[in-house]
Image (cartoon, rainbow, N blue to C red):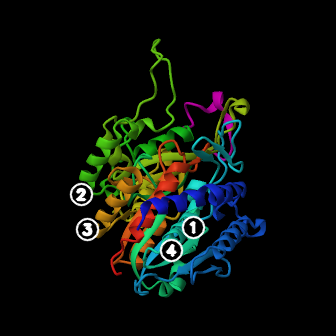
Amino acid sequence: MNLADLKAITDRKWDEDLLPRLADYVRAPAKSPAFDASWAAHGHLESVVREAQAWGAAQKIAGLKIEIVAIEGRTPCIVFDAPATGGFGHARTVLFYGHLDKQPEMTGWRDDLGPWTPKIEGDLLYGRGAADDGYAIYAALTLIGALDAQGTPRPRCVGLIETCEESGSPDLPAYLELLTPRFGDVALVAGLDSGCGDYERLWVTTSLRGLAGGALTVEVLEEGVHSGAASGLVPSSMRIARQLLNRIDDPATGRVLDEVFHAAIPAERIEQAQRAGSILGDAVWKQFPWVGCNHGGDAQAHALPTTTDPVEGILARTWRPALSVTGAAGFPSVDNAGNVLRPKTTFKLSLRLPPTVDGERAQHALGKLLTTQPPYNARVTFSGDHAASGWNAPATAPWLAQAANAASRAAWGKDAAWIGEGGTIPFMNMLGNYFPEAQFLVTGVLGPKSNAHGPNEFLHIPMVKKLTQAVAAIVASVPGG
């Protein structure tokens, strides 16, 4: 494989074709069904799927079949199949995964930016969804086409692009049940929906945390009452909710208390965290938009993380449980808050779980801890969300480790790095169950400051170009030619 020629092909494709297409994709408010109950009527998911399928069908990949598959009542997906070339057998395949649905708008965007307003500024394409994960189908078919254009042998490549990942992939099991027989013997799963520790090398995701959570509601009154008349006698629903949350984690440290939510960290993952920590240093925690403060005249003072040790920071956000309150109800706005003791408080809870903890078991334990023997005999209910178990990658085959390092050196001049991610991608467990013998190349472009799901989300353009080249080199290295 001529890497210089491959780079020229893929860079030109990104500059002339893919970046304008991703800008159009950003404009589409193709929100995942969890955030748009009328997604079918609005038609945005169907629109981005049709545009991607039409683009794929026009690519010069011999024998490529690409179609939209839609099960009645479920979100649509794209399936593609590119036959093997150059003497590779057709039985063993590389399975590409991506998604085209998006998170909702979120507030806090810069005045000149917006979720549905693409803007290229330097090396960054701002807007919702390009990096998470609209680029995936375009990168996958581009790298397949680039390998074919220079005559590099490759295995059969198939792809599954869904449209409900940001909702927890509830439709994916039905599609896997329907489509898996088409995919053959999957040797490598290439999931392009993950992150990177920096933009200077290939990062391979080794694990993902699971997720439990739901809505905790505490009720003490049937209606609000004058706080002067009742406070001190009627317990505050907020105070009771606070006590209940203290059953889950230590308010001083954030450490989750019950061992049911914890798991032993494998030695290999600790070693990988140590190497990643030596690479990233303080960037492990400085990548986040901390509030700058001026305490006691110190202009450099700012909010601090739970730890500034990079290795502990990596393990804390990838292999340890953590509780967050992500929403609240029952609170009037500040400008409408009178002297009233509120009748109830509701918190939306998100409990991230270590990769090897069973999500359903953790969900049951969470509900039991919150609702057993409530203080003051308050009415406490917990409405649990769909739980998701995490994922821990199988042992890396020597060929994949060597190919990842070689590809990273070719594209960036540095060895690849291996790291866990703190988020939850439910499809990884599903794919692991369906393809237990496969190797997994889970990677992506969501690096420092890219702010997936939040305001000012961006795609790092040089990173996505080099990632396309690196994944191409790894695909060409799959054994079986």
CA–CA distance in space, label 1 to label 3? 27 Å
Q: Amino acid at mark 4?
A: Asp
Which part of the image, by quadrant, shows the C terminus?
bottom left
Q: Which residue is the site of mark 4?
A: 148
* Residue sitting farthest toward the top: 297
- 3 or 2: mark nearer the eye: 3
Residue 120, position in %: x, y?
65, 45
Q: Nearer the viewer, residue 394 or 415?
A: 415
Q: Which mark is residue 269?
A: none
Instruction: Please rate how many residues cluster around mark 3, counting C-alpha atoms within 10 Å: few if below 14, some from 14 to 19, many from 20.
Output: few
Residue 213 position, x and y percent, is: 49, 56
Count residues near mark 2 (Cα–Cα under 10 Å), then give few for <14, some for 14-19, many for 20+.
few
| C-alpha distance separating marks 2 and 1 | 32 Å
- Residue bearing mark 3: 398
Residue 89 image position (x, y, % from top left) = 40, 86
Q: Main secondary structure of the magenta part?
A: loop
Q: Residue at x 70, y 68 (%)?
A: 51
Residue type at the position of mark 3? Pro
Task: Write down the residue under mark 1.
Answer: 137
Disc on the earlier residue, 3 or 2: 2
The amino acid at mark 1 is Ile
Between circles 2 and 4, the one closer to the viewer is: 4
Q: Position of residue 32 (x, y in %)?
A: 64, 62
Relative placement, left or right, of 276 versus 192 is: left
Residue 477 lies within the magenta run: no
Q: Are marks 1 and 3 in contact (CB under 8 Å)?
A: no
